[in-house]
Image (tube, helix red, strand yellow):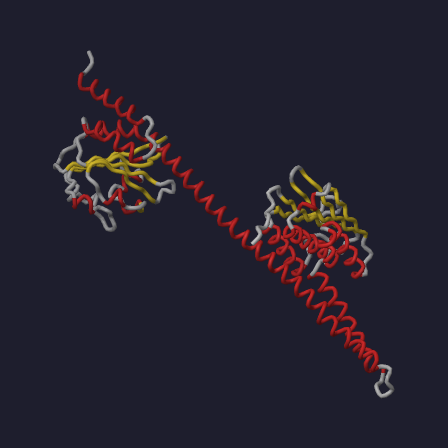
C-alpha cells in the first residue's frame, strides 16, 4: 500500500519538473518552483547561489523576501556565508538560529541580510552535476528551529531536479558572454586596424609628397650646384684636383637621393601595376647591388592584382620590396623568384631565395620582417616566413608568403 504522504511528495517533485520546462533564465526558474517547494519546505526566503565558471565568484537568485544578495554583482566565493558548502567542505548546512551561528559570521562574510531580515532557521544543500558543486539551494525562515533532517533530504531531492537546468543555463550564459566579448574584441580590433590602415594611407601619400618635393626642389638644387662646381674646375685659379672629390661626393649624394625618391614614390606601381613595379624594383636593386643574381617574376594571378584597392596594392608592394631587399642585402642569394598566384578566392604572393636563410639575417633585416608583419596585419593578410623548402641544403634559403584573403578591406571615401 502506497504511503499517501510520500505519494503526495512525489507529485510535488513531478510538479517541479513540469514547471521547469521552458524556463530560460535563473530568476524564472526560482519564481516558478518557489510556491511548489513551499508546500513541503516552508520558507520566507528561498534562493539559489550559482558558482561562476571560474570558481572564484558566485551570484544569487532569490524568491520571497528581497535581499542584497541578489542585487549584488558577482561576489567572491570567499565572502559567502555558505562558502564551506560551495567549496565542498561540508555536504549540507542546517542552523536553528543563523543570526547567532558563527558558521555564517566571519571576517569578510556578506551576512548582513541574515541579521537585517532576522533569517533564523536556515537550510542549505549543494547543487551537484557529475559530482561537482555548481551552486547551492537555500531555504530560510524567520522562525527559530524550523527545519529538520527530513527537510534536508527533501531539499536534496529538489536540488537534484534543479541542478541540470542550472548547469545548462550557466553554460549557455557563459557561451553567450564569451561570444559577446569575442565580438566586441573583434570589433575593436577591426576598428583599430581600419584606423591604422587609414593612417598608413595618409603616411604613404605624405611619403610620396616628400618624394616629389625632394625631386622638384632638393635634387634640382643639387644638380645646379654640381654644374657650378664643374664649371669652377675649368678655371685656372682653382685646382681641379681640389674640387674633383667634392664633385664625386655630390654625384653620389644625388644618386642616393634619387634612390630615396624612387623608394618614396613608386611611379611604376601607380602607372603600370603591382607586378610591373615588383619587376622594376627587382631589376634595379640587382643592378645596383653589383651581384650576379638571377631573378624572375611570375604573375599567375590571371589579372587578380588589378582588382586590389590602391592602399592594399601599395602595402603588398612594400612587403615584397622589403623581402627582395633582405634577399639581396642580407641573404647572399644567387636566385630570387617572386610568384603571384590565385588560390581559390585568395591571392598568394611568394618571394623565394636560395641564400643563407633566416639564421644570420642581422638586426636590420629583423626589423624589416617586423615591418612586413605589421603591414600584413593592416590589410588583414596572412604573413608567413621561413625556410625555402625548394632548397635542399638544411637551413638554406628563405620563403616569404603573403596571402590576401577574399574580404580585403576597401578604403571608404571621405
Please tell me which residue lies in front, 177 or 224.
Answer: 224
Please tell me which residue lies in front, 173 or 99.
Answer: 173
- Which quarter of the image is occupied by the C terminus? bottom right
Query: Left or right of 200: which side holds 234?
Result: right
Residue 258 lies, in percent from the top left, at 74, 66
Look at the picture and state if 28 lies above or below 401.
above
Look at the picture and state if 357 lies above or below 3.
below
- On the question of residue 123 being in view, the answer is no
Furthest toward the front, the residue is: 414
Please tell me which residue lies in front, 210 or 363.
Answer: 210
Q: Quadrant of residue 181?
A: top left
- Which quarter of the image is occupied by the N terminus? top left
Q: Quadrant of residue 6?
A: top left
- On the question of residue 251 being in view, the answer is yes
Please tell me which residue lies in front, 400 or 284.
Answer: 284
Residue 364 lies, in percent from the top left, at 66, 61
Furthest toward the bottom, the residue is: 237
Residue 341 lies, in percent from the top left, at 71, 42
Residue 122 lies, in percent from the top left, at 19, 37
Q: Quadrant of residue 169?
A: top left
Query: Left or right of 212: which side holds 132?
Result: left
Amino acid at each position: 500500500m502506497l504511503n499517501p504522504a510520500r505519494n503526495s511528495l512525489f507529485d510535488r517533485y513531478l510538479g517541479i519538473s513540469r514547471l521547469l520546462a521552458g524556463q530560460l533564465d535563473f530568476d524564472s526558474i526560482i519564481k516558478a518552483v518557489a510556491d511548489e517547494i513551499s508546500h513541503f519546505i516552508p520558507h520566507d526566503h528561498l534562493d539559489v547561489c550559482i558558482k561562476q565558471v571560474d570558481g572564484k565568484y558566485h551570484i544569487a537568485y532569490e524568491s520571497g523576501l528581497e535581499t542584497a544578495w541578489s542585487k549584488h554583482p558577482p561576489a567572491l566565493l570567499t565572502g559567502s556565508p555558505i562558502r564551506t558548502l560551495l567549496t565542498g567542505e561540508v555536504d549540507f548546512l542546517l542552523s536553528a538560529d543563523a543570526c547567532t551561528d558563527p558558521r555564517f559570521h566571519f571576517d569578510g562574510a556578506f551576512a548582513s541580510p541574515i541579521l537585517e531580515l532576522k533569517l533564523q532557521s536556515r537550510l542549505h544543500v549543494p547543487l551537484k552535476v557529475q559530482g561537482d558543486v555548481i551552486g547551492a539551494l537555500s531555504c530560510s525562515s524567520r522562525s527559530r528551529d524550523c527545519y529538520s533532517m527530513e527537510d534536508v533530504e527533501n531539499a536534496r531531492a529538489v536540488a537534484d531536479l534543479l541542478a541540470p537546468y542550472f548547469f545548462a543555463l550557466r553554460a549557455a550564459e557563459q557561451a553567450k558572454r564569451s561570444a559577446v566579448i569575442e565580438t566586441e574584441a573583434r570589433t575593436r580590433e577591426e576598428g583599430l586596424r581600419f584606423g591604422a590602415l587609414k593612417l598608413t594611407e595618409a603616411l604613404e601619400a605624405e611619403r610620396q609628397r616628400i618624394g616629389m618635393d625632394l625631386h622638384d626642389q632638393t635634387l634640382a638644387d643639387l644638380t645646379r650646384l654640381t654644374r657650378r662646381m664643374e664649371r669652377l674646375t675649368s678655371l685656372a685659379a682653382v685646382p681641379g684636383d681640389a674640387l674633383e672629390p667634392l664633385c664625386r661626393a655630390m654625384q653620389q649624394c644625388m644618386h642616393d637621393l634619387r634612390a630615396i625618391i624612387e623608394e618614396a614614390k613608386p611611379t611604376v606601381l601607380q602607372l603600370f601595376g603591382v607586378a610591373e613595379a615588383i619587376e622594376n624594383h627587382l631589376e634595379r636593386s640587382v643592378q645596383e647591388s653589383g651581384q650576379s643574381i638571377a631573378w624572375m617574376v611570375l604573375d599567375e594571378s590571371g589579372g587578380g592584382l588589378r582588382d586590389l584597392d590602391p592602399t592594399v596594392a601599395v602595402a603588398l608592394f612594400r612587403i615584397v620590396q622589403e623581402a627582395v631587399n633582405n634577399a639581396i642585402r642580407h641573404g647572399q642569394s644567387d636566385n630570387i623568384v617572386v610568384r603571384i598566384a590565385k588560390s581559390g578566392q585568395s591571392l598568394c604572393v611568394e618571394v623565394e631565395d636560395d641564400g643563407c636563410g633566416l639564421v644570420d639575417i642581422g638586426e636590420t633585416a629583423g626589423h624589416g620582417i617586423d615591418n612586413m608583419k605589421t603591414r600584413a596585419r593592416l590589410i588583414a593578410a596572412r604573413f608567413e616566413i621561413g625556410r625555402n623548402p625548394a632548397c635542399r641544403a638544411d637551413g638554406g634559403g628563405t620563403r616569404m608568403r603573403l596571402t590576401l584573403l577574399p574580404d580585403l578591406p576597401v578604403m571608404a571615401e571621405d
